[in-house]
Amino acid sequence: MGVSKLGVRGWLLLGLVTVVVLAATGVWNPFPTMWDWVDRRKPISEPDVIWQQRIGGTPKSVTIAGDTVVVEQRTRVEARSLATGAQLWERKADWAAVAGGDKDPVVAVGKLLVRGYELLDPATGVVRRRDDDAVAVWTYRNMLLDARCIEPTDCTLSAWDPRGTAPLWTAFLPGVSTGLFADNPDLLGTRRLTAPRIDAGAAGPEAAPPLLGFPVDGRVHVVDTATGRVVQNVEPGRDERLAVIGGRMLRIRAVSRDGTCQYAVSAREPATGQEVWRRAGVNLRTADSAGCVQREDPQGARNVLIGVAPDGREAVIDGYDGRLLLVDAEGEKLLAVDDRYALVRTAGRKAVVGRQFGVDRPRWTRPSTGKVGAALTPYAAVFSEEKPNRLIALDPRTGRELVVLRTSANALAVGANGMIIGEGREIGYVRFGAGRAVPPAPPRDGGGVSGPGGDDDAPGAEDSCGPKRELCPDPRDKDG
């Protein structure tokens, strides 16, 4: 009779006291299991990822660096195991960028408005090299560049092997642009096509181009990345914009005439200033509609440009020699390009076609009727689709499916064997082909991009030999 008077609340209180006593004495502790159940995270894709982890904040960038994943956040950077997702190290930093290839990656970190940077080993976080003076850093697969200034008009640009301890070369620059600071400030090159739910840096660091254009006080200083020699110091004309693409210096002219913008582009050999090719009437999308003022770099990727012909069709142009690598049919839309391939949405918006420069027939065709975005990386062509939300990775040469995910997450980084996807603070790793490595693409079938830095071989060949193959021995040299 007395026990029944406890009521529901009394029994609950008695049960809670009993559980607390049992947990305190070590007899039985249900709380860890209960917390695991409460904290259990919903998988961010179907099929499920290999691993999924929650990081401290929304990532600014994610890069696959060898066997690690480097995650840059607003005030810190961390590295995780590519195999398990377990955190390897973490430290405070305002910016971070990865240099080097799969075998020799390093992580450059620094603080905003503070000179200097540190190079960290991505697997351990150990400092490999420290610099106290640099104001800007540029990271590539085959080198790292930094700039330091004794005075505003007295600056030195240095090139380093990613894991080297002495500069490969140094060059004098009469100052740097006020916008050049921290990691990878903009230089005068190409402006990439973008895609929803695919991070602009998903491909990771690229090989350094043969020439770089540094804007300084209204002039452009063109630097040879193999030797460090400043080969040109040019001031653009009133109606011109300069860009350094494919080993050439481009002068892009846009003038307002008869109510429209009229365009002309000429490419010059920087060492001599001699014109090597010219095209008129091609809109490289450098100007807005207000007075034809050119405020943007031309669209493209690496050594190729994207232009719009007077009839509205898009074209891909070789920056080195001006060849038309591809001209879309009426109504077609370029989704992504690199030095070898183009992904094109058909006029009826019912399919995406994979094309290889120098090959007449499409490599492959994939049905796609909804909204789609795409990006090309050295290892995969990545697509984002909506309604239903999916991420898809294909072999860019054959169109073979590497992975198909039902997910609303973003593609953050793409590596040789898989990619990192993320949604909010959750990131995860998915392998291509159920763990099968993606075979390297074979050499192109006669065509593609020519000149210094062109992809005449499979992906990785240029990265390991340097943009002018200066790091590879001559096969005719028996001692090489």
Image: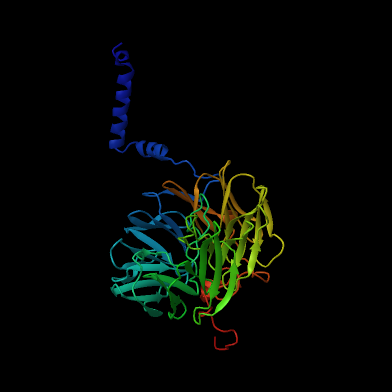
Q: Residue furthest top?
A: 1
Q: Residue furthest right?
A: 361
Give the colour scheme of this rendering.
rainbow
Q: Nearer the viewer, residue 292 or 199?
A: 292
Q: Quadrant of residue 81?
A: bottom left
- From the viewer's perspective, is residue 13 above or below residue 380? above
Left or right: 333, with 140 as reference point: right
Q: Residue furthest front?
A: 258
Q: Nearer the viewer, residue 336 or 122?
A: 336
Q: Which quadrant: the C terminus?
A: bottom right
Residue at 47% x, 41% y is: 42
Q: Residue 360, image x and y in percent?
A: 71, 64
- From the viewer's perspective, is residue 227 above or below residue 33? below
Q: Residue 3, image x and y in percent?
A: 30, 15
Q: Which quadrant: the N terminus?
A: top left
Q: Nearer the viewer, residue 112 or 266?
A: 266
How many numbered badges does the structure rendering display?
Answer: 0
Q: Residue 383, image x and y in percent?
A: 57, 52
Q: Is residue 356 visible?
A: no
Q: Residue 317, image x and y in percent?
A: 60, 66
- From the viewer's perspective, is residue 138 above or below residue 380? below
Q: Nearer the viewer, residue 220 or 380?
A: 220
Residue at 40% x, 75% y is: 160
Q: Quadrant of residue 168?
A: bottom left
Q: Is residue 178 visible?
A: yes
